[in-house]
Amino acid sequence: MCGIAGFISEQNIDNRKGIIKAMTDCIIHRGPDAEGMWLDEQSGVTLGHRRLSIIDLSANGSQPMMSSSERYVISYNGEIYNSSELKKHLESRGHNIEYRGTSDTEVLLESFDKLGIENTLNFVKGMFAIALYDRQDKKLYLTRDRVGEKPLYYGFVGGSFVFASEIQCFKSFPGFSGDINQDAVVDFCHYGYVPAPMTIYQGINKLMPGCVLEIAAPYKEHKVWPYWEIIEVAKRGESSPFKGSFEEAVEELDRLMTESVRGQMVSDVALGAYLSGGIDSASVVSIMTKLSSGSDKVKTFTIGFDDKKYNEAEYAKDIAKHLGTDHTELYVGEKELKDVIPKLPEIYSEPFADSSQIPTYLVSKLAREKVTVSLSGDAGDELFAGYRTYDKLLPVWNKASKVPGGLRHLAGNIFTNAHFGSNKIYRGARCLRADNIVEMRGALEVTSLYKDKVAGREVKLVDDKLLKGQLGSLLLTDMLHYHPDDILVKVDRAGMAVSLENRIPMLDRDIVEFAFSLPDDYKLIGKNGKRVLKSMLYKYVPEEMMNRPKKGFSVPLTKWLTEGDTALWASELMTSSKLAEAGILEKDYVEKLWSRFKKGNENSRFVWNILMLEQWYRHNTK
């Protein structure tokens, strides 16, 4: 796991080494073990790298790295889990390469050289953000893993093409303006994250998951193309579903999970796993335990909360005892949780407002005391229908969709214009106007203040990438947007802030493709979500140990924002908004939101979104 940065400029930029060092110094937390740079004066290409040593701890794994043919140079962030299979594949094609070391970087680089970019990307399994320069054709390629585990930002600054693992690196490049993207602000106020490909800054974008960016001399224009698309995977799975019985699906998931976890347990440094007490993390840890040898116990980590309403640590401890892991738990109170708040702009260099970011950072910090790599159970909810939203929304849509669309729209328009400030009425009206289940779900997650817009613009609440099935459409939408832009950002930044590599076995390509091929009732019947995943888990952990309400990984936001020092902090930010002073947010919107929240008429999530944006803005405009 590492951090990358670089730029291409045919302009005579003085002190290229100083610039790339300043950029990579911004992401030293992503790679504290070593730094490297590669410059080509003729083309203007400059590549930088920060290294967190995981595989091949020697200097043979250092980057940027040049291929044996000296045609390609790579600066790469991530892990290729099937690098040994890739090496064998190269040998079977007649490429007998004399490797300098044992790193996955070198195998990946030689594959790009010998097999080509698209053939290599189609073969590999892993998480990655890659900058690959072709010295022969004078082309730079940027590429990102299939689902977006590793971040990659890019854009033009003046006449130079610039890229980096994190967005704060751009501030170290001469001429970067840092102008705020107003459309990103509007979407952030709704979602609590900036949806890709946008970023908070004008002219800077996120490379989309599963895509390749190609830019050639004279480096003025670029093109982006996909090598893998989850929408196509979902459509293929819907049209050609899994034909086996439910029991066969359980066995197949067990096999796929075992292979994925086996590949992701490869490491030359200490490795462990998060164990929250839920289905997903317990599934990963169960298989890790199965694969562990002899007395080499799996190390597991849990954060507990003094507030029993949010605490699952006791359940995690029971699971750890049953599986025989080397378990570490840390209980934290509100003080420890709140102490993280001032650090958030540094940890999440772009505005980010999923409040579970706080405990996620704390559990990452706890794990880093003993390991450098940690596996997690993320993606179980999105792939196997674990959120309660799914089972609650499906029957509502099935009833509403029987009413003629024209009649629903008419009623919705009437109530939209006469909601009297009531979120309940407004959301109900938006639901009546919904043309599909995804739009209805979006309608349930708005505030009536959006009728007055945010800073003069309205947020887009609809996605047009739908399947024929209702549940499949919800799952696909979450995997396209919420999961990569929220969950994966949260996990990556929290881990990297403490130089911890997080791995997510359920995002293995084969598991994702298998999940989208499963019939709906293998995932969800009534309130019973994640059916196939639960059944797999019960082979390792007794059902009665897991049969309890899900508490989630959350914090008491409403309490924080209405009591004590945090309430005073929130009040100061909301009543003297620098964003409003700068015209980035409408003052009236901020004042109404805060007033309604204090009266109990507004969701704390929307207030937290503004607070995180405000805190980020103040931190970045000092």
Image (spheres, grey):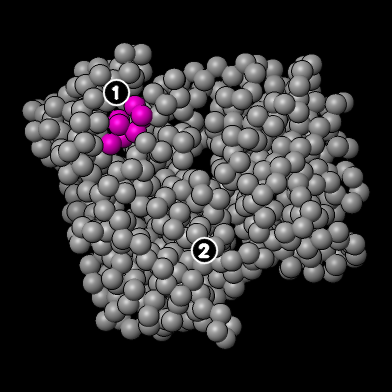
* Crowding near the residue tagged with mark 2, few <14, some 14–19, many ≥20 C-alpha atoms within 10 Å: some
- Reading the image, the residue beneath label 2 is 370
Instruction: Write the residue at 80% across / 43% down.
Output: 73
- Left or right of 64 on screen, residue 571: left
* Image spot of residue 336 (x, y percent): 31, 49
Q: Main secondary structure of the magenta part?
A: helix
Amino acid type of the residue that numbered disc 1 sits on in the rendered structure? Val
Q: Who is closer to the viewer here, 83 or 473?
A: 83
* Image spot of residue 59 (x, y percent): 79, 53
* Image spot of residue 356 (x, y percent): 34, 49
Question: Which is closer to the viewer, label 1 or label 2?
Answer: 2
Report whether residue 340 is seen.
yes
Residue 457: quarter of image:
top left
Classify 475 as above or below 289: above
- Left or right of 50 on screen, residue 372: left
Which stretch is magenta? Answer: 608-615
- Reading the image, the residue beneath label 1 is 454
Classify 160 as above or below 610: above
Instruction: Write the residue at 20% across / 62% down.
Output: 308
Q: CA distance from mark 1 to mark 2?
A: 45 Å
